Image: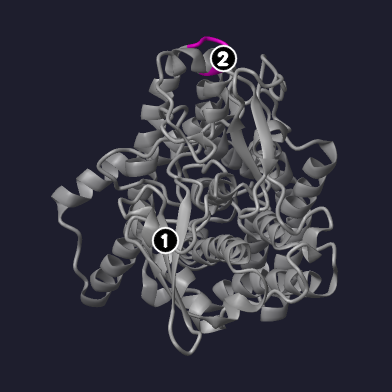
Amino acid sequence: MITWGDFYKVMSAMVPLYFSMLVAYASVKWFNVFTSAQCSGINRFVAVFAVPVLSFHFISRNNPYQMDSQFLLADTLSKLSLLFSLSLWLLFFRSATLDWLITLFSLSSLPNTLVMGIPLLQAMYGHFTHSLMVQLVVLQSIVWYTLLLFLFEYRAATFLIRSKFPGPTAASIVKFEVDGDVISLDGRDVPLRTETETDSHGRIRVRIRRSTSSAPDSTLSSSVGLATPRLSNAEIFSANTPLHLLQSHHAGAAEDIRFGYPTGSPRVIDYATSSDACSLQATPRASNFNEYEMTMPRSPPLWTTSPASGGRNYQQLSPGMCSLNVFSSKEISFRDITDIPMLEEGGAKDSVGTNQKMPRALVMMRLILNVVGRKLLRNPNTYSSVLGLVWSLISFKWNIGMPSLVNSCVEIVSDAGLGMAMFSLGLFMALQPRIIACGAKRAAMGMALRFLLGPLVMAAASVAIGLRGPKLRAAIVQASLPQGIVPFVFAREYGVHPDILSTGVIFGMLISLPVTLLYYVFLGL
């Protein structure tokens, strides 16, 4: 039975986190304390230092030789069950698309365990849940987010191949070579082009390179401009930032219009928590999410169909062309600028032809793993998770403690990690014109997946594995945590239902506390 003392203990753990989020929200929404550039700096710190060091701090102190295999197996079984069910849906239903498979899997199985799960579960069920949540964080960071990134890159590779090698031609591809400066196959950072070489046996070798490469055009046997603006997954920032917050940032900005869209926009409101969470580049990559607004004063935009991505190309009208007002002068919503129709949507599954072939599975696997590996190497959380796991293996194997000097350096940054992560979410929420960006029906669907289906599947998997007592209750409550940030970062970068994931992050964070408390009380009866 849950007592008032238990309830107060939970509230004492969670209210400070929500207070940090509320302070950030009020500082931007009501008091205009921070400018867009200052928000960028705050959230860059969270991405590059606070969250990775926080992850390292938790993982390095967790004993990997005492992992709860039963608890981890239950979590793995629940995720695999959802993924298997969605895969069957994709195979046997014409209305199903890979985009929806990715979105539904993200909503139902990837909660915010690091920031919300550790303090909440520890307050509810005791210190033993701290180790369980850290184990889930390791598994989520190394396995499930990598799998999610693999699915996104597979989707991008499929569109690229269908656009450049329609029909049976793609089946003859035996090798892909990807230039070192190509980080993603979706071509949103810069347009991509392909070079092909065919031998006497009809086997094709393909080189994928940025269209900004210095190679002469005469050497190219084919090229493709994937001209859908890319969303930098280095930061979580507001896609819906009101124009008045961006005017100072856009003033005097020079535009370089190439392949149908600007490629030289300044950095706008940068948020980061994970994913590619830091581009380890000499020059920070410009965020293209708000490039639409930059061109508005000169001429209105025009959306056209992109054969490569199945989405929309952003083009600049000449002064003599007619005006087409797409964006409101007051706000920019996800529905206006980020809902990029996929090739399969709208009954377009047959648009590529029934005889479309793909390269052999091994060839595709090598291509996608190559690109995924490059993105992981640019992610500070990859290094923090791996280094934390390696140190814990060494430390608990030979009983070696971390030097006090290093430990103090880690603690002083990690102590700020939880509060700064919630502060970043507050800034993100304040920069949205509306909390529900995807419409009421899709928002309700997302909340049902997040807070009903996820816990239900987790409960079934846990019971099947044999979890009982506090561990079973902790597993169910953990599955009812709010939406994780990393899936939204990926969704925004690849243009796959970012409005739904944004609503899951924002609205889910607001209702997660009462929902988890209801689960806590119900399971304690």
Rendered view: 192 above or below 466 = above
Q: In the depicted view, which residue is nearer to us: 228 or 513?
A: 228
Sequence-earlier tag: 2 or 1 = 1
Secondary structure beneath label 2: loop
Amino acid beneath label 1:
Leu
**Marker count (numbered):** 2
Residue 11 at x, y percent in the picture: 60, 37
Secondary structure beneath label 1: loop
Instruction: Name the residue tied to disc 1.
Output: 220
Q: In the depicted view, which residue is nearer to us: 84 or 8?
A: 84
Rendered view: 403 above or below 170 = above
What separation in Å lies between label 2 and label 1 (alpha carbons)?
Answer: 36 Å
For the residue carrying disc 2, how many other residues have a C-alpha within 10 Å: few (<14), some (14-19), or many (20+)?
few
Rendered view: 273 above or below 200 = above
Question: Is 156 part of what is drawn in magenta?
Answer: no
User: Which residues are the magenta region?
Assistant: 28-32
Prevailing secondary structure of the magenta residues: loop
Q: Residue 297 bears which disc, if any?
A: 2
Quarter assignment of residue 50: top left
Q: Residue furthest bottom?
A: 201
Q: In the depicted view, which residue is nearer to us: 304 or 452?
A: 304
Q: Residue furthest top?
A: 31
Q: Please say whether residue 491 is visible from this viewpoint.
A: yes
Question: Is 30 part of what is drawn in magenta?
Answer: yes
Quarter assignment of residue 318: top right
